[in-house]
Amino acid sequence: MSTKPKQGRSRVLISDIKPLVDCGRYPIKRVVDEALKVEATLVADGHDVLSGALAWRKKNAGKWQRVALKPIENDQYSAELSFSEIGAYEYKIEAWIDYALTWLHGLEKKFKDGQDVSVHLADGIPHLEFLKAKKLKEAASLIELISKDPNAAAEKALEPWLEEAFHKHPEKQLLSESDLLPAYCDRKKANFSAWYEFFPRSAAAEGHGTLQDVIKLLPRVADLGFDVLYLPPIHPIGEVNRKGKNNSTIAEEGDVGSPWGIGSKEGGHKSVHPELGTLDDYKELIQKANALDIEIAFDLAYQAAPDHPWVKEHPEWFKWRSDGTVQYAENPPKKYQDILPIYFESEDWENLWDELLSVILFWVDCGIKIFRVDNPHTKSIRFWEWAIAETQKLHPEVIFLAEAFTKPALMHALAKAGFSQSYSYFTWRNFRHELMDYMEEVSQGPGADYFRPNFWPNTPDILPYGLQSGNESLFMTRLFLAGTLSSNYGVYGPVYEQLAHESVPGKEEYFNSEKYEVQHHNWEAENKITWLMRVLNKARKEEKALQQNRNFQSLEIENQSLFAYLKWDGEEKTVCVVNLDPYNMQEGWLQLPHDFMPLSEGGYRMYDYISGAEYRWREEWNYVRLDPARPFHLFKVIG
Amino acid sequence: MSTKPKQGRSRVLISDIKPLVDCGRYPIKRVVDEALKVEATLVADGHDVLSGALAWRKKNAGKWQRVALKPIENDQYSAELSFSEIGAYEYKIEAWIDYALTWLHGLEKKFKDGQDVSVHLADGIPHLEFLKAKKLKEAASLIELISKDPNAAAEKALEPWLEEAFHKHPEKQLLSESDLLPAYCDRKKANFSAWYEFFPRSAAAEGHGTLQDVIKLLPRVADLGFDVLYLPPIHPIGEVNRKGKNNSTIAEEGDVGSPWGIGSKEGGHKSVHPELGTLDDYKELIQKANALDIEIAFDLAYQAAPDHPWVKEHPEWFKWRSDGTVQYAENPPKKYQDILPIYFESEDWENLWDELLSVILFWVDCGIKIFRVDNPHTKSIRFWEWAIAETQKLHPEVIFLAEAFTKPALMHALAKAGFSQSYSYFTWRNFRHELMDYMEEVSQGPGADYFRPNFWPNTPDILPYGLQSGNESLFMTRLFLAGTLSSNYGVYGPVYEQLAHESVPGKEEYFNSEKYEVQHHNWEAENKITWLMRVLNKARKEEKALQQNRNFQSLEIENQSLFAYLKWDGEEKTVCVVNLDPYNMQEGWLQLPHDFMPLSEGGYRMYDYISGAEYRWREEWNYVRLDPARPFHLFKVIG
């Protein structure tokens, strides 16, 4: 008669699989060895026993691995997996009526009810034959016993071995299967990284800095404890419409321009600015950084100065106006004449995409494994999804950080499309309730499975109003919060260590920004900020709880100026307490959370990385007092 | 290089479409003219203006209808549709960068900023040409004005006509489209029906009732105000292993058996029990019922007595045990020897499905449009999905009620699979908080888009403990709650009107149940229950708010024994107040809900269908007092 579904005899339905990003359209993200707990609802008609498994493999390849689903409640089941290698994966839920267990449970109920079970026993012989074929001797002898002594056979069948054997060797008849769902396993650095940023042209003691000057600063970066060094673009800077100091539209003689105004007669996105050095210098930098456990993050900024070689060679990759000029970037009424946006709707888009991808692959070949992507939210999201996937097919270790300070839905769209990390709203979250809400969102909200935040107290584009005070305590707490709330964090230095705080009036922008000029810094200076960087990065390396974001819980503390929180990783726990008031000493009582830190006789030893002191907390409520001069505790919880 | 997505140039991404049942795997349900509000998130890179539409059509056919999406907040958009015909539909979200509006908004910002807009105006000529091609004369004259007088042209372009024209004639370049999503539009009865059930064999004054006796009772059913008459199965009843009175496993001479033990030498699922009459009698019953605006609901019970013709003709449709007998129904240690379950895992399952579907189509050909399905949760859910869809392809007006009193996930799975209505947990929800929670779940929970509850105070299978008291007030309130809380409700009579309450000791089952014997009733008796049935069914027909379940709000009332609630349909509102205490008068103050019933000078006229009285409520809090003898108000809200 009518077409019938292929799975017509498979009676189990699988639904409500969680987590799921846009119904499985985008991958769940995890890092190596990080748990992924999958839930699903299994239902079938009738009263039969259902069994199921969570199965996963490398995408389109490899052997399926499986773990049994366990019932939770109300027909929900769950299982947990973790990936042991980086790369793209796929997983699915399998479910089936477990005829063997159904038979066994029926036997148990009838036998206990005193019913004659001889026919029931005989009905089960096919299930025992299945086990016998798996070389289970006990199954063979049970088959013999059934015809000889049904009562003894029933007793034998109801011993634990048979249920265990059925679980171990499921028959999986008339299997139901979910759709294949995608996951991506990154290397651990995608989840745990400490970034330091500076301008290479400001790396010299005098004059225009070079990549060789950057190499000389690597030991300092390592000593401060950072493991990613992010440099703004290193390409030739456009000369046409070049920006002057303080974003002036007219550059004066000798003005160096913005590194993000990429491309000139010296080359474009695959070239090194001659004043910084050569491609070999850059490769040397990458290698010498790696030797100190530092990775260089490349700034991928897909835009062109008016004199970028692409404009002549591929005019179709830009939008042309009715007056014969190329469309420059604008957000009316604002104009950005030094930058031409890429025209992603170009009819030559396929060649354009190939060229853009080739830029990434070029730098990967030079040794780059981390890309910080400039303003990805002004470039086609579909392009990113394709380019990141294509890169990771060849180089699954490559990490992309999205520099998109924009609307929530757009930031999430980029993270779904494949960005490994994302800049975040942390920069503008100052009060306790703001920090709590935002941490709950990033640690437990719908984005928790694909949006990995990276917390920055400042960037070359953003000098937040708070930091414009120049208050040292606030500079300390913002850095401390970034590095303890989020497992990925970064800071734009050395201006941060110097408490630089002069802004363009009324704006959250640095005055005399390094974006438009060369500066010189005292890289040797030591102060509370450099002290904190070392202590913080050391604690982060030792405390597993600070190396992930999924497990976060804010703690009760009876003072609105104090913010306390627990992070944990398995049994390892870290408690932080921060005085958010940069001007006054604050004290209060902090409550240990019942669920995570139940009280035992010995209480807890609280070792403070900041002071080196150790306290013993034996009570539910514990007194803390923090001075703006040293406004936080970072406790390792022992026992 | 690598494969690129087809939609590579389409920059808009569509996500988070709501409502969605299992990611679009199952249809959203609506009835004719019922609103379906669809939400979606649209994002694209950059700052361009996005536009979108909700499009729908009859499944696989017909012309697309469209309505524009309107922004809500945070990149969410919504639009509302309603279906004008019954049948299967599909819908989708379309979205595009609105280049014309982007250009117009840019023009406005630049012009207001005092910038020279002559090039910008010229850039927009293609958008004006597009309107010109749509015969818009103003667009043609604007094109001419642009070269003559840019300032005048800008002013002309910024008048409302142009923005309106762009909205009316979207260019829809590089369109993004969501997946097609399914919806099913039922006739209104799927959402609004009053069911009455009795046993046709108990329809006679004496002896075994017949379908002709049922025909004689139709005027009474119509007079009580019911519009669906549901009769238990009318097929020949098995003689092998027939059940005796009170579910005895041994039938005595003359015992009539259970109508759900279907099939004998007299025939099976396409036959009428000779003692009830003929197929022609049944067709006559259907026609005479229809003439009184009553539909006959057919009991579709897919199971076989041991002597059902299928067992001999299609032994492969049953499960055979190792001793050569057919597997009877069991839920160990319980046994149901009079019923053989259908074996849905049969290798001959495709012929089996065809035969089962043919049963439905046979009765549809006789005039049946409503099927009450017996225990659908013990038959393959995939079968139901197929059978209901196949039936509705040919007969979109057919309605299926699932009689599944089982686990939530399984009840929801059946509703998703296509059942138009479902029996519900109402039967066991007695206290105010239970009723409130359950109503919130069914009216606003995830099932609200596919699970249509049908509320029954009793069934032949269930005499709830409360009703075993025989308390008349409780019989009234349970009927009143069923018929006012849910737009679909039903009652098993005439035992309900008679306050029948003798149970099998310790069980929620009727003693001397009509399931196993013929009974005789005084169909002429009038009492408070028959009075209430008339009043309730009249109010339901007049009050649109009682004809749907989506808009429900419980009201504050300062007495835990009183339960008050508002239902509304557009501007039409109904307020009910129920005394849940069947033994004592209860009084209390009821609060009008600010959001739905703001106070104005005249207040509200409250017309009570129960007493015929009218009150004027001028205050936020209003006094009510209810005696168990008349334990409810049913207010039409006027003004």
Image (cartoon, coloured by chain):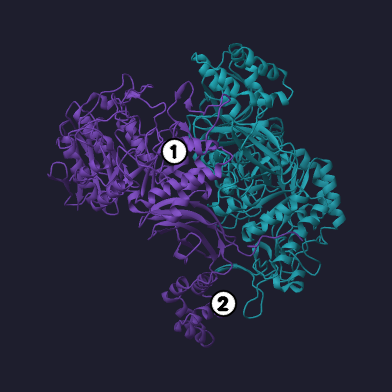
Chain colours: A purple, B cyan
Q: Is residue B622 left or right of residue A518?
A: right
Q: Position of residue B356 (x, y in %)?
A: 74, 61
User: What residue lies at 43% left-to-right and 32% top-to-bottom?
Assistant: A305
Q: Is residue A246 left or right of residue A166?
A: left
User: What residue lies at 24% left-to-right and 53% top-to-bottom?
Assistant: A291
Looking at the rendered structure, which numbered label has been put on residue A120? Answer: 2
Foreground residue, B139 or B355? B139
Q: Position of residue A225 (x, y in %)?
A: 21, 45
Q: Pointer 2: residues within 10 angstroms few (<14), some, or many (20+)?
A: many
Q: Residue pushed farthest left?
A: A613
Foreground residue, A310 or B273? A310
- In the rendered structure, which disc, 2 or 1, sits on the residue that comes first in sequence? 2
Question: Where, by quadrant of the figure, is residue A338 drawn?
Answer: top left
Q: Position of residue B411 (x, y in %)?
A: 59, 52
Query: Which residue matches tag 1?
Result: A302
Q: Position of residue B528 (x, y in %)?
A: 67, 37
Q: Chain of mark 1?
A: A
